[in-house]
Amino acid sequence: MQAHDDVAQSRGMQSTDAAGADFDANDWKTRVIAGSRTGAAARPPSWLAGSYETLREQVMHPEYPCFFGTMAERRGEMFYAYVNGKDIRELPATMQTFATFASQPQYRRNNIAVFFEPDREPLTHEQYQELFWKTLQHLHDVDPDPEADKQPDPSQEEWEFSFAGVQMFVVCALPSFKVRHSRNLGPGMVLLFQPRAVFVDTITNKVIGREARNQVRKRLETWDDVSAHPDLGFYGDPGNLEWKQYFLTDENTPAEDRCPFLKRKKAQAAASSEAAAKPRGHAYAPHHAPAQRHVDKARPLHYEHSGQRPHGSDQWQAGMPPNAKARNEQSES
């Protein structure tokens, strides 16, 4: 079974590569993770630099809504990963390495951005939605955490995506967003995983201020050409469901009542029934996008960000608005 192989791979993450990693806050390439490898050993593909630079240009703009994302990028508090084509077989091992780092005090406030290789022709929003949820489902199905089966149901307010024992808020950014510019960060799908610890004050050990998060919502009104999505909320509030905020529509259409994500026990039962009738697969590829052999070379991309944003040296002037008081606050956006 492919799932078995991925579980075995993800459990062997305490490698000398990861343990002896040497990160440079001023060199993003040193913070690339691929399986248990980091930096140059992660062998980042040629297309990754272009995708990273597009994301950086966006988040470093002074008016980018999530100013805490801006500060994380500026301070070197981001890790990066990549997916060639649609092959997510190594992603569980990559996320295990990130979870290992996130459990260490010096990295507990770090996020990870997972870049998917840009498609020659961008997928539709619905096709990206299918790819996104199948990716999260795959990670959950091979999660090495023994407590994974005891997680709450996504329909419960306390549910948050978790992998290797680390709860994470997930933001899906896509080139198919035309008016919700805050979630269009490049020519391919980008998944931002933010550990729950990021949203906890390091001194009081309490969830960070609502005021700062409200500031982010106000900035969304200016940056995007559409109002804040009605599904956006605050973790722990009555009626708030985290999964609805992971993948948004370009319009303000509320998410369906049923989460596409299945708890692992149900998924494993279904997979066991399917396994006997199907040959072993080698990589995930949605039915609309068959798996293809990856060739690491530059190629033209049909990508054009729909929002015209200034760029240049003024990107480095980005920072917290004067009325955002708490230094440690973060926002889900």
Image (spheres, helix red, strand yellow):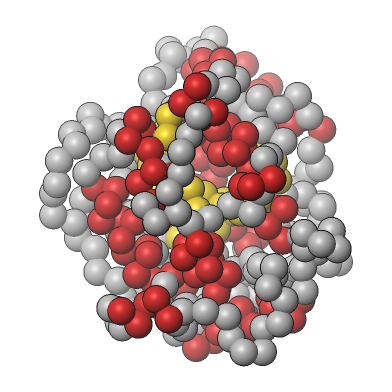
Give how far across and how far down residue 181 sits, in percent. Answer: 42, 74
Q: How many marks?
A: 0
| Left or right placement of residue 212 versus residue 311 in this view | right
From this view, report whether residue 131 is shown above or below residue 303: above
Quadrant housing residue 293: top left
- The correct choice, above or below, for 251 with respect to 127 in the image is below
Farthest residue to the top: give it.
Answer: 276
User: Is residue 133 positioned above or below 316 on the image?
Assistant: above
Percent coordinates x, y for residue 75 in the rendering: 50, 62
Q: Residue at x 81, y 42 (%)?
A: 152
Q: Position of residue 326 (x, y in %)?
A: 72, 76
66 in relation to 111, above or below: below
**Image side of residue 30 versus residue 268, left or right:** left
Of the pair 78 and 45, the residue shown nearer to us? 78
Going 63% across and 43% down the picture, which residue do you hit? 102
Residue at 39% from the left image edge and 76% from the top image edge:
316
Front one among 21 and 165: 21
Q: Is residue 135 among what the camera can see?
A: yes
Q: Nearer the viewer, residue 87 or 134?
A: 87
Query: In which quadrant of the rendered view does residue 82 lie?
Result: top left
As drawn, is 194 to the left or to the right of 115?
A: right
Query: Which part of the image, by quadrant, shows the C terminus?
Result: bottom right
Task: Name the spot of residue 85 as percent of width and height, x first.
Answer: 31, 38
The answer, for residue 231, to whether it is visible in the render is no
In-front residue for pair 248/271: 248
Residue at 72% in and 53% down: 197
